[in-house]
Image (spheres, rainbow, N blue to C red):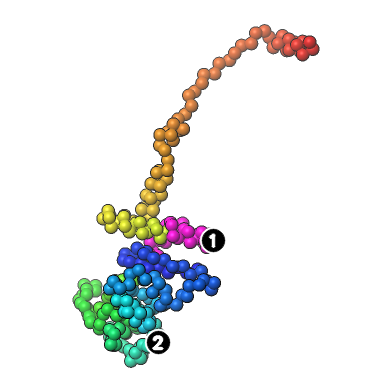
Amino acid sequence: MKMFKLCTLPGYTCKLQLYSGKNDQMITTPTIVVMSLCDDILNLDHAIATDNWYTNLDLANQLLNHDTHLIGTIRKNRRGLPMAVVKAKLEKGESIATENQRGITVLKWKDKRDVLVLSTKHSNGKRTVLKKGKAIKKQKIILAYNETKSSVDMSDQMTSYSSPLRKTVKWYKKLAIELFLNTSLVNAWIMYKENKNTSQGIVQFRRQLVEYLVDSGVDKENCEQQQERPKRMKHELLKREGSVAKLFLRRLLERKC
């Protein structure tokens, strides 16, 4: 089972789609997945950030047709990419880019390794940033992608903290736990932090929420009444008339009669 997420910064999950296997009627090509997840936010000039499993030229063109931008890393074997960029040999810090008539830019940048990025919103411009106290110029596409790519990663990271999920739990139970006790809780935590302007951590928020839910279902007055200890009763020994032997004989005679 796969779960596809549409997240905003800083990790709020807006929409989910599930893929349960071969019998699922949903076709899970990258383009269809993204277009389906984003159908409510198209034609609003938004920018979608994707990783290299989703990013391709067909998706970029379809999003542009709906006034929506795309930025993301892209695999070098995707169809339609400019070979001059893909096959370029670069030294560390060097970059090469090309832009087509629709404004789709494909950029290759050499850091520790080659990074291939596609963007429909940025050209091959640079921006000055500080790195370890030094001013350096870095491609706007790379900076923009680094700023936006962490939304899904942040969502997954937050759900993993003190998660109730366990390996032995069956898949349908895992799904329920993921939706109600992880994803929904992270969304609530993000909204709480923004509204209250607090830096409370996810673990503390989860604990506080559990305590609140437990207390909210208890009638404190009835609970206090039930918990009151019963009054102590005074025990006294009652003396019987006559000796034990006389009492025994009396009962024996009564039975014979």
Q: Which disc is residue 202 wearing?
A: none
Q: Residues within 10 Å of mark 1 (few under 14, many from 20)?
A: few
Tell me where residue 78 appears, x and y as whole percent: 40, 85
Residue under numbered circle 2: 79
Q: Regarding mark 1 in the picture, which secondary structure is present there? A: loop
- Residue 124, by quadrant, is bottom left
Is residue 213 depicted above or below 199 in this figure? above
Residue lying at 46% horizontally and 58% vertically, measured from the top left: 177
> Residue 89 in magenta?
no
Is residue 246 visible in this depiction of the protein?
Answer: yes
Q: Which residues are magenta?
A: 155-181
Residue pointed to by mark 1:
170
Q: Residue 178, how many percent across, how many down? A: 45, 60
Residue at 68% from the left image edge and 9% from the top image edge: 243
Amino acid bearing label 1? Lys
Mark 2–mark 1 Cα distance, whole angstroms, equals: 39 Å
Question: Going by the image, does 228 lie left or right of 72?
Answer: right
Split into 4 quadrants, where in the image is the C terminus? Answer: top right
